[in-house]
């Protein structure tokens, strides 16, 4: 039996709009990074049973796992990483995609979201590629299960 995906606050009590608004309060990127790292602490621990090779996201500098369940057309994601900043970035992404339908996921303008956060300019190229790999995996899941 596979472990179930745990609930997390992203896409529920922590929305993409909340993150944009909160990051706007900080004047320095050092403070914004601290906030993003704190977001990662909101992710529930992922059971080891979910940390399988097929859930590992390729293209990330760190190890990143993404599990999902489709509950009556709504996607519930659980993610984990071995890096604190990446866990926070997962929170940023999940706030946009968790508890949404496949169509809502595919319709969400992630580029505009990242731009409003001014995020990609402040990440290393490898972290930026990893972020895009995470988004791509979620889009692939939504496309596959929407068919």
Image: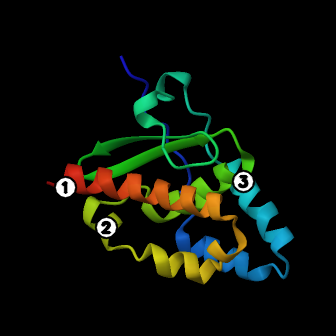
Rendering colour mode: rainbow
Q: Report which residue position mark 1 lands on.
A: 146
- Distance between the Cα atoms at labels 2 and 1? 10 Å
Q: In the image, 105: left or right of 19?
A: left
Which quadrant is the C terminus positioned in? bottom left
- Distance between the Cα atoms at labels 1 and 3? 31 Å
Residue in the picture at 47% in, 65% down: 96
Q: Where 32 falls versus 72 (above or below)?
A: below
* Element class at badge 3: helix
Which mark sits nearer the N-terminus, 1 or 3?
A: 3
Residue in the picture at 77% in, 81% down: 25
Q: Quadrant of residue 27?
A: bottom right
Number of callouts in the render? Answer: 3
Q: Report which residue position mark 3 lands on.
A: 85
Q: In the image, 94: left or right of 34?
A: left
Q: Measured from the top left, where is residue 29 in percent x and y?
A: 81, 74
Q: Quadrant of residue 138?
A: bottom left
Q: Residue furthest top?
A: 1
Pointer 3: residues within 10 angstroms few (<14), some, or many (20+)?
many
Which mark sits nearer the N-terminus, 2 or 1?
A: 2
Q: In the image, 24: left or right of 55?
A: right
Q: Report which residue position mark 2 lands on.
A: 106
Pointer 1: residues within 10 angstroms few (<14), some, or many (20+)?
few
Pointer 2: residues within 10 angstroms few (<14), some, or many (20+)?
some
- Front residue of 41 and 122: 122
Q: Quadrant of residue 136?
A: bottom left
Question: Looking at the image, can residue 11 be seen?
Answer: no
Please say if the residues under marks 2 and 1 sit with CB atoms less than 8 Å apart.
yes
* Element class at badge 1: helix
* Element class at badge 2: helix
Q: Measured from the top left, where is residue 88 in percent x and y?
A: 67, 55
């Amino acid at each position: 039996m596979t472990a179930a995906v745990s609930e997390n606050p992203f896409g529920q009590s922590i929305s993409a709009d909340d993150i944009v608004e909160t990051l706007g309060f900080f004047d320095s990127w050092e403070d914004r990074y601290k906030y993003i790292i704190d977001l990662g602490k909101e992710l529930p621990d992922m059971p080891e049973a979910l940390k399988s090779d097929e859930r590992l996201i390729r293209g990330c500098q760190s190890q990143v796992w993404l599990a999902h369940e489709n509950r009556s057309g709504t996607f519930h994601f659980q993610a984990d990483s071995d890096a604190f900043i990446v866990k926070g970035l997962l929170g940023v992404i999940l706030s946009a995609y968790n508890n949404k339908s496949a169509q809502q996921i595919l319709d969400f303008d992630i580029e505009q979201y990242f731009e409003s956060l001014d995020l990609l300019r402040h990440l290393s190229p490898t972290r930026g590629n990893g972020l895009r790999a995470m988004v791509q995996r979620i889009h692939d899941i939504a496309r596959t299960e929407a068919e």
